[in-house]
Amino acid sequence: MRKIQVLDKDHSKIITPLYPWLNTSKTKGHKVLLGVGGNVGDVVRRFEHLYWYLRRSPFLTIVQTSPILRNPPFGYADQPDFYNALILIKTHLTPQSLLDYILHVEKLFGRTRSFKNAPRTLDIDMIKYEKRTMVTSKLILPHPFWMTRASVLLPLKWMKGV
């Protein structure tokens, strides 16, 4: 069951049984905010599968998910709209180990990298890892553009206490 609320001409909010979702049990680990997105195929269904895949993961615990946002692409604009959501997790993995894990998950879900901002089945970005700042050739924390993207800001405002 999907409930769609049109926000404006470019954005819609999508509610499913798992987006939004809140885990009320106490968990330990580093608090990490992940951004997920995609625009190839049935992305909402893929997000549901991603939720269950991550829920079974020994490397993390899902704390909360946001509603899903449908929004226009940016960068390369000649492609279908994107669907985006946020997933708050707790993990004991280091930022680099978590990056390696989420890149692996992207591949499992059919992600290929043909060119910058290309259409994709699944994109997982590490938005924040606790209050840590980091700049390496493979990872910048917090994500350098999160504060300018509706695909992060709108779902973030719909989450509780993040």
Image (cartoon, helix red, strand yellow):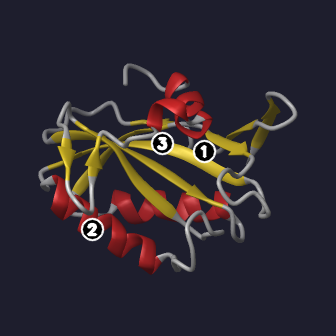
- The CA distance from mark 1 to mark 2 is 25 Å
Observer-side mark, 1 or 2, equals 2
Q: Is residue 18 visible?
A: no
Observer-side mark, 3 or 1, equals 3
Question: What residue sits right under mark 1 in the picture?
Answer: 17
Question: What residue sits right under mark 3 in the picture?
Answer: 86
- The image shows residue 3 at horizontal and vertical percentages of 77, 39
Q: Is residue 44 visible?
A: yes
- The image shows residue 99 at horizontal and vertical percentages of 27, 62
In the image, farthest residue toward the right: 9
* 72 displayed left or right of 134: right
- The CA distance from mark 3 to mark 2 is 17 Å
Q: Residue at x 75, y 57 (%)?
A: 77
**Secondary structure beneath label 3:** strand
Q: Is residue 26 above or below residue 126?
A: above
Question: What residue sits right under mark 2 in the picture?
Answer: 101
Sequence order check, earlier mark of 1 and 2: 1
State which quadrant residue 130 falls in. top left
Q: Residue at x 16, y 41 (%)?
A: 30
Q: Residue at x 27, y 56 (%)?
A: 139
* Residue type, label 3: Leu
* 32 displayed left or right of 53: left
- The image shows residue 85 at horizontal and vertical percentages of 55, 44
Which of the two residues, 95 or 24, is positioned nearer the viewer here?
95
Which of the two residues, 79 or 82, is positioned nearer the viewer here?
79
Q: Residues within 10 Å of mark 2 (few under 14, many from 20)?
A: few
* Residue type, label 1: Pro
The circle drawn on residue 26 is none
